Amino acid sequence: ASPAGDASKPGRVVAFDVQEDALTSTRARVREVLTPDQASRVDLVLKSHERMEEHVRVPGVNAFDDDLNDDFNDAVSATDAVGVVCFNLGYLPGPTADKGVRTNRRTTVSAVASGVRVLRPGGVLTVVGYTGHEGGWEEVEAVMELVSSLDPREFTATNHSVVNRDNCPQLIAVHKKETK
């Protein structure tokens, strides 16, 4: 995606995970399906999603040490706010994955709050929450509580779910309204 729809400014993807295996798999997939130029705009970060604002710079939202990233800070403008934020909660799937390593209510609520702060007008934030594992439903409920409290003049928050099947993922979406 390009910031504010400006094709002359290519967008960037910043992906977070606390498991190196997840990033290794993603890195391989990025190299497989993207051109080198496209792949150069994908940053894979071995940190919790709650650390998003350390890696996503938005003027007027978060402050950064100008000496650390002069090249990036010189290029940042008001249109560099984030257009899309996606969360896929739970644990890394697969037969060899450690299902004990998973997202949790505290860090997820902090991360979603950060995601809402960095959204540009017209931006969308989504959360896919899995309720079938221990703590999953509580995590989804905490996110619902947070997005339900957003000012309806600035945001539209929705929840989508399958109602005729147990333990289906919940899709929570937040749209930041365009400013007038």
Image: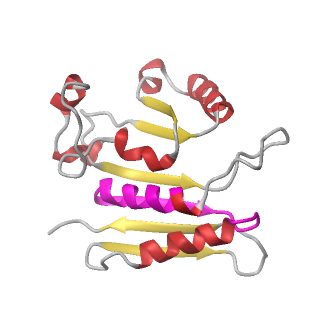
Which colour assignment does the render follow? secondary structure
Taking the magenta stretch, the answer to whether it contains residue 122 is yes
Look at the picture and state if 123 lies above or below 174. above
The image quarter in which residue 133 lies: bottom right
Q: Is residue 34 left or right of residue 163?
A: left
Taking the magenta stretch, the answer to whether it contains residue 113 is yes
Along the line of sight, the residue nearer the viewer: 106 or 36:
106
Residue at 47% in and 67% down = 173
Look at the picture and state if 126 lies above or below 25. below
Magenta stretch, residue numbers? 107-135
Q: Is residue 16 left or right of residue 10?
A: right
Along the line of sight, the residue nearer the viewer: 147 or 174:
147
Q: Which corner quadrant holds the N terminus?
A: top left
Q: Is residue 151 left or right of residue 179?
A: right
Residue 14: % across, % down: 44, 38
Residue 110: % across, % down: 45, 58
The image quarter in which residue 130 lies: bottom right
Residue at 28% in and 41% down = 57
Q: Which corner quadrant holds the C terminus?
A: bottom left
Look at the picture and state if 162 lies above or below 36. below
Residue at 70% in and 50% down = 91
Residue situated furthest right in the rendering? 95
Residue at 35% in and 46% down = 53
